[in-house]
Amino acid sequence: MKKKIFALLLAWSVFFASMAEPITEVKVWAGETEGDTSEEIRRGILPNGLTYKVKGDGTMAIIKFEFLGEKEIEVPETINKRPVTSIEEHVFEGCKDLEKIKLPKGLEKIGVCAFRNCDSLTELIIPSSVTEIHETSLSGCDNLQSIILEDGNKKYTLDDNGILYGRNQTYLFACPGGKTGHVNIPEGVTRILFVAFEDCKGLTGITLPDSLEEIKSNAFWGCSSLEEVTIPESVSVIWDSSFSGSGLVRVTIPSSVTRIGASAFGSCRKLTDVFYQGTKEQWGMVEVQEGNEPILKAVIHCTDGIVGEEEKPEDKNPDNTEEGSDSEENTQKPQEPGGVEEIHPKPEENEEPPKNPENTEENHPDSGENTKPPQKPDTETGNQESTTEEKETEEAAVPALKVELSVKNLPSSKKIYLAKGKSQTLTAKLFPADTTDTLAWSSSKPSVVSVKNGRIKGKKSGTAKITATSSSGKKASCTVTVLSRNKKSVSVKLNKKSITLKKGKSYYLKASLKPANSTDTVKWKSSDKKVASVDSYGCIKAKKKGKTTVTVITKSGKKATCKVTVK
């Protein structure tokens, strides 16, 4: 009996003692956190609604927040004299009215979805002590204008746009959700992580670097103002939901891409044109997984024409089996009048479709196959025919949707380095292939770099922007820097040391010179052209099963190799 009374008094004394502490709840139970070394973990709730627990290493982790509409919250540096080193998963997720979160010095870890969907959060200061941030921790913060990184952080860095990267800038971690305008991702970045730009509704443009190799799932999910993107040739897979729900109208996909993941372009309802930098046959070998109806419904422009345009016209000339085929001759030469249905561009919204697309004889009154009697050469008839021809010619105009620049035997077509007095030739390619547009070339500083029909020449030291503009207003440009004399390369590096390709596939190798402003040209060669060839742009084409080595050689004699296996 005495033992029972003593136990009861002890329980009451513990209860009242705990009420006197600033912590409103204390529980003790067996350890359950991965990595804990202690047999017991202590947990409590602070007056501001933060729930903590003691980790196995003796430090504190914030594991929960009881949100009651607060505008600001401060995470303390210590609890019961123990440092707070971790904010665990989902702690502040969905706190829509929370505008400011002050994180403690000494914090090391920010967990899964820690600040996800904090819609009112406009600024986050990350302490210099932080060494681990989960890639989902800042996703869905639509109004986050700036991420501030305290000086001395050894794991992360920021660029001028306030975008968070790994310390050596090889991977892009997160873009503030409130970011607006165009973003240029610097060369050297190889990965864009999961949900990095998720719900950046104000993002209107993105320039991806040639060094990029991987765009993770959901990277640009919900970027509703993003209308155009060019995926670099170093990317081989477009991962699931990468651009799902974005505002894309046009997308350029390199021939190096072998797979488009599930819903990579799902719900891209505005998508009208896909520019594939390979042949129609190569496009047919790309694995397009489910949920990509927008990309399959778009007009797919390949280097040898539009996918589907090789289909025969409806019985216009059933006996002539050669006309309308997809042979090289037919795709490159203009069709002879009479017998082949004219292929018209897809009309724009609210635009009246071309009239009389099938009757090609009316456009060619002198054709031998024209069975109509010749018109009388009176003035009235002649004027009527002339007006009709002019109208149909005007309706048949095909504006360019995209301009691309390339240059042979140089590491990059975006940044070119020339010695004074030296020249290079830029090639501009218009899409679609049947466009009627013409090109105009211009230099921002003709006294530094001159340009004529794509031929550029260094006039004096400095930097100029060279632009190719189509008559319908589409543009492509590159930066040309002129040095006082040639600068030799001391080394060259390829973005891949080895690669495996399926027969018929292509991949663009990227060469990086050191120093980056070397004026050296480069040459490419394959040890076995029958297995895989390589052109002057570094494009490998897999031909048959086997192995070969592709080598790039700078003008100064520096070399780098890539082992190629064709399956």
Image (cartoon, rainbow, N blue to C red):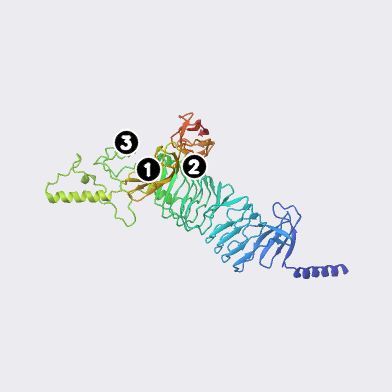
- Residue occupied by mark 3: 329
Q: Nearer the viewer, residue 204 or 423?
A: 423
Instruction: Give the Cα distance between marks 3 and 2.
Output: 32 Å
- Residue occupied by mark 2: 234
| Residue type of the residue flagged with mark 2 | Ser
* Residue depicted at 21% across the width and 50% down the height: 388
* Residue depicted at 39% across the width and 51% down the height: 272
Instruction: Give the Cα distance between marks 2 and 1.
Output: 31 Å
The spot of residue 241 in percent (x, y) is 50, 51
The numbered mark, 2 or 1, whose residue comes first in the sequence reads 2
Q: Foreground mark, 3 or 2?
A: 2
Q: Which secondary structure lies at badge 1?
A: strand
| Residue type of the residue flagged with mark 1 | Ser
The numbered mark, 3 or 1, whose residue comes first in the sequence reads 3
The reply, left or right, for residue 389 in relation to residue 137 is left
| Residue type of the residue flagged with mark 3 | Glu
Q: Residue furthest right?
A: 2
Q: Nearer the viewer, residue 37 or 203?
A: 203
The spot of residue 564 in percent (x, y) is 51, 34
State if disc 2 and disc 3 touch (CB < 8 Å). no
- Residue occupied by mark 1: 450
Q: Residues within 10 Å of mark 2 (few under 14, many from 20)?
A: many
Q: Foreground mark, 2 or 1?
A: 1
